[in-house]
Image (tube, rainbow, N blue to C red):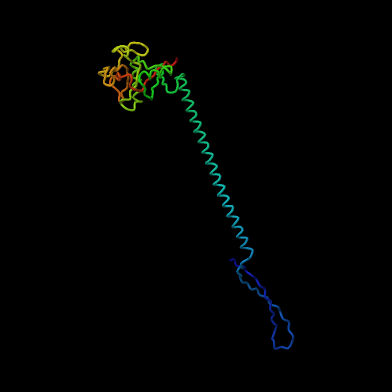
């Protein structure tokens, strides 16, 4: 509690001269000051005012802190929205560039078809017999692939290796000797060029172990690659395999 200083004036009188003399005398007043401190009693106005000032100060501090936090939150939200907008713009730009690149390199490409050397190729992910595979290719305005060069064989073998899940995961090609044994023809009725063949060693062998009619259809694929690109084998046309379809890019 605060202490207050109080000043009191005390007046007294003092007789002049000797008090034994019978003559009247005039008394002179005498003054003195007495100071003492008094403690402020509870309920006085001063502490109440101090408490009000403290309350106002606390409220101001709280409002200031809330204002700072709100400003920080608004700033963080603005930064996040800006980053999200920039990310969306970047993704959209990448998609547009990819679409434009595809349109420029392969204007007539359809889903699943891959361009190469002026042709389109489709590598199936499902298995069918050779004849069923050919019908499937024709339904997409193509046919089983006809391999006309070493470069084309290299391209196909590279793509097939990437798509094979296991060693026996082979792909039908458009080659068959079903009309006459040993006379291999492509699906476009051209005869197989003996100087441009990629039979594995010992193939074709017309094995009859799984079909008395022998093996009259060609397939390809080596999971780990093969020397000199020799990945062709004959197989029973009834066996279900994946396939490679082909059609002209500008058909």
Residue 184 position by quadrant? top left
Res. 239 in view: yes
Q: Nearer the viewer, residue 189 or 180?
A: 180
Give the position of the N terminus as an image quadrant: bottom right
Q: How many numbered marks appear?
A: 0
Looking at the picture, how far across and down is residue 96, in whole percent? 49, 26
Q: Picture coordinates of residue 53 (x, y %)? A: 61, 57
Q: Nearer the viewer, residue 158 or 217?
A: 217
Name the residue: 64% across, 70% down. 6
Image location (x, y in percent) of residue 75:
54, 41
* Residue 133, image quadrant: top left
Residue 118 falls in which quadrant of the image? top left
Return the x and y of residue 144 as percentages of the image width and height: 38, 17
Residue 2 is left or right of residue 190, and the answer is right
The outermost residue toward the left is 202
Q: Nearer the viewer, residue 22 or 38?
A: 38
In the rendered view, tell whether residue 224 sits above or below residue 250.
below
Residue at position x 44%, y 23% in the image: 111
User: Which residue of the protein is positioned furthest toward the front in this rendering?
Assistant: 212
- Assign the C terminus to one quadrant of the image: top left
Q: Is residue 99 left or right of residue 31?
A: left
Is residue 194 visible in the rendered image? The answer is no
């Amino acid at each position: 509690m605060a202490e207050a200083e109080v000043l009191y004036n005390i007046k007294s009188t003092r007789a002049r001269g000797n008090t034994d003399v019978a003559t009247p005398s005039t008394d002179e007043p005498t003054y003195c000051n007495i100071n003492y401190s008094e403690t402020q009693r509870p309920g006085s106005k001063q502490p109440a005012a101090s408490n009000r000032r403290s309350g106002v100060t606390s409220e101001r501090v709280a409002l200031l802190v809330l204002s700072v936090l709100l400003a920080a939150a608004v700033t963080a939200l603005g930064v996040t929205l800006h980053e999200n907008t920039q990310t969306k713009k970047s993704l959209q730009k990448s998609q547009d560039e990819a679409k434009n690149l595809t349109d420029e390199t392969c204007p007539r490409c359809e889903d699943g078809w891959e361009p190469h050397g002026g042709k389109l190729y489709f590598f199936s992910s499902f298995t069918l017999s050779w004849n069923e595979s050919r019908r499937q290719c024709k339904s997409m305005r193509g046919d089983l692939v006809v391999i006309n060069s070493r470069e084309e064989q290299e391209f196909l073998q590279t793509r097939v290796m990437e798509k094979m899940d296991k060693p026996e995961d082979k792909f039908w090609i458009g080659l068959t000797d079903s009309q006459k044994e040993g006379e291999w023809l492509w699906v476009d009725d051209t005869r197989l060029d003996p100087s441009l063949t990629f039979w594995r060693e010992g193939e074709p062998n017309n094995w009859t172990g799984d079909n008395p009619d022998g093996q009259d259809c060609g397939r390809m694929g080596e999971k780990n690659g093969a020397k000199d690109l020799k990945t062709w084998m004959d197989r029973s046309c009834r066996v279900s395999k994946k396939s490679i379809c082909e059609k002209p890019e500008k058909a």
